[in-house]
Amino acid sequence: MEVLQRQPDSASHEDAAAAMLDSVSAVPGQPLSCPNHEGKMMEYYCESCETAMCHECTVGEHREHMTVPLRDVVEQHKASLRQQLEAIKSRLPHLTAAIGLVSEISQQLMERKNDAVAEIGSTFAELEKALHQRKGGLVRDLEALCGAKQKVLQVQLDTLRQGQENILSSCSFTEQALDHGSETEVLLVKKQMSERLSELAGREFPEQPHENAQVDYVVETEGVRKSILNLGVLLTTSATAHKTVATGEGLRHAIVGQATSLTITTKDKDGELVRSGSACLQAEVTAPDGSSASPEVLDNKNGTYELLYVPRQEGDHLLSIRLYGQPIRGSPFRVKAVKASDVPPSPDDVKRRVKSPSSGHIRQKAVRRPSSMYSSGKKKENPIEDELIFRVGNRGREKGEFTNLQGISTSSNGRIVVADSNNQCVQIFSNEGQFRLRFGVRGRSPGQLQRPTGVTVDLNGDIIIADYDNRWVSIFSPEGKFKTKIGAGRLMGPKGVAVDRNGHIIVVDNKACCVFIFQSNGKLVAKFGSRGTSERQFAGTLDGPHFVAVNNKNEIVVTDFHNHSVKVYSADGEFLFKFGSHGEGNGQFNAPTGVAVDSNGNIIVADWGNSRVQVFDSSGSFLSYINTTADPLYGPQGLALTSDGHVVVADSGNHCFKAYRYLQ
């Protein structure tokens, strides 16, 4: 006799089992009557049929089966059910965590949607009459995009919650049977519930997020009246961490002191390649001694990213890669770093287009190049004997600590101002390196900071900050009180910032590969530059221009990261000349970053990939290096001259800034 039938879902399973118990149960805790032989108690168990029966059944239809007294097997089956129960209950925390994570992403998506709606509203306020039609279209697109993302997340949430409900229901029923059912009742439902519990234990649940909360709104207002119907785009990706993969030799092996690269390929929830860039990727390399560094992540704008890092010691390193805060597939990775002398040289090493910062300072004889056609002929001092005065900071989030500091500036009243990018704040120190002030709150509202990169100080002492992720420039008082923001709706990725002799604010837009000139009230004065490899253009296939300085002629000096050069423009944005080429020799660069100009017009440049600082005359002829051997740099970013004549450098890879004596 088949007592229990397998049911298609948990509700029918448990209803059928309950009906079975109701139909055969007599007095709880007492043997049940056999449904086949009236008046006979079920006191035996058939192992072949997995059912209880009376004595008459054992000599009847079950006479050829192995039967044993019921009491001999009931404890064994109870233990089996309890084991299955505990196993299935252990899945509940994972489902709860998954529900929490997906719900958080859903909430973040709503917040970004609301932020984007607010940004759309503020952008179109000035041009409401002309832009009303496009505004509605953008909001509808945003609703559709977010709706599609929410639909994916909601389907996942429904599946997770259904799974949670099924497990809770099955667990509750099984616990009730175990705690309150008789021995016979337990045996009657054992097969059915065991199958149900086994099915739930083996069922796959979508515990990894199927979407992300990124929704970025980007708009360019120049010339909007000619292209109003196509103004503004919504940026997002469908990339998910648990499907995204990393490939390359850099996942397993590396050579101490040499650049190592790998490729990250983003994929969506179905494992399909994502064809667009702008995903939020973060990486960290932890050395055997526990120290850590943040590798450079270069966006190829096609769904793939190049990650560059340099191990600084032998041994096993831990490489952690996260997408939208979640580890990608296989992360963290264990990378074994060995000395170069332990492996044969690879021809691939010389084929790298752009290298990461070298771990040591490159020292070469400072041989002066021939003067360029723009040289004034004035002889400059050669600051060969410069040296380290002090360093401030290490990796952390407290006062005087940094995480990926970027820009650095100084003021005439003896202050050093640092843009602490990943800590979303600005820190201020004295010329001697003593901490004075810290301000900044993470966020996307006016007065908040999302990713401060460039920083400068104007003649009034106001602090001007380029906020890369908020896509605007914020202005704060010397005490750190927010005053206003400029460039919203125009800037796509502001990086470097400077103030000229007219009080104009000059902003390098890293993403748009151009330079904006604003009045202090935010009115646009001029814009110049475009994406390309010509002398007048900025390279932007991976990363655009970085930092900017102004010389004593009010000329604008810009570092062109991937063209490995420095370019000089007039105050109106007319191209004048450039200097530098790709390499490690005197006057060559491997991705220049920070730039400053001294009172004699000499140009000081942070050479990021070569981890050094070079000095040029006003025409771009090489003069010397600043001696950094006392404490080598690792991927320097911004630099500036203090009021007492020292050079301060944002040593991003070492999470500190350093001051060097500078002889003009």
Image (spheres, rainbow, N blue to C red):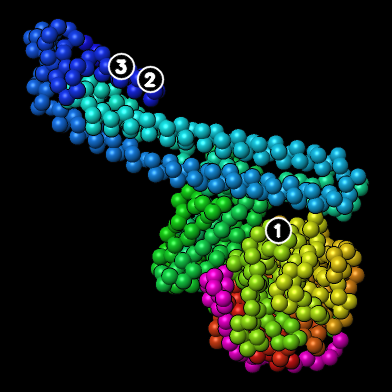
Answer with mark 1 or mark 3, whichever residue precedes in sequence.
Answer: 3
Up the image or down, 395 lies above or below 270; here it is: below
Rendered-image quadrant of the N terminus: top left
As rendered, which of 64 and 447 lies closer to the eye? 447
In the picture of the structure, the residue carrying the numbered disc 2 is 12
Q: Residue at x 90, y 70 (%)?
A: 572
Q: Residue at x 45, y 51 (%)?
A: 330
Up the image or down, 433 lies above or below 540; here it is: below
Residue at mark 1 to residue at mark 3: CA–CA distance: 60 Å
What's under tag 1, amino acid-wise?
A: Ser
Sort mark 2 into few (<14), some (14-19) or many (20+) by Cα contacts within 10 Å: few
As rendered, which of 307 and 162 lies closer to the eye? 162
In the picture of the structure, the residue carrying the numbered disc 1 is 445
The image quadrant that residue 601 belongs to is bottom right
What's under tag 2, amino acid-wise?
A: Ser
Camera-near label (1 vs 3) is 3
In the picture of the structure, the residue carrying the numbered disc 3 is 19
Circle 1 SS class:
loop
Query: Where residue 632 appears, x then y in whole percent?
Result: 56, 81
What's under tag 3, amino acid-wise?
A: Ala
Q: Is residue 324 visible?
A: yes
Q: Is residue 399 magenta?
A: yes
Span highlighted in magenta in the image: 376-403
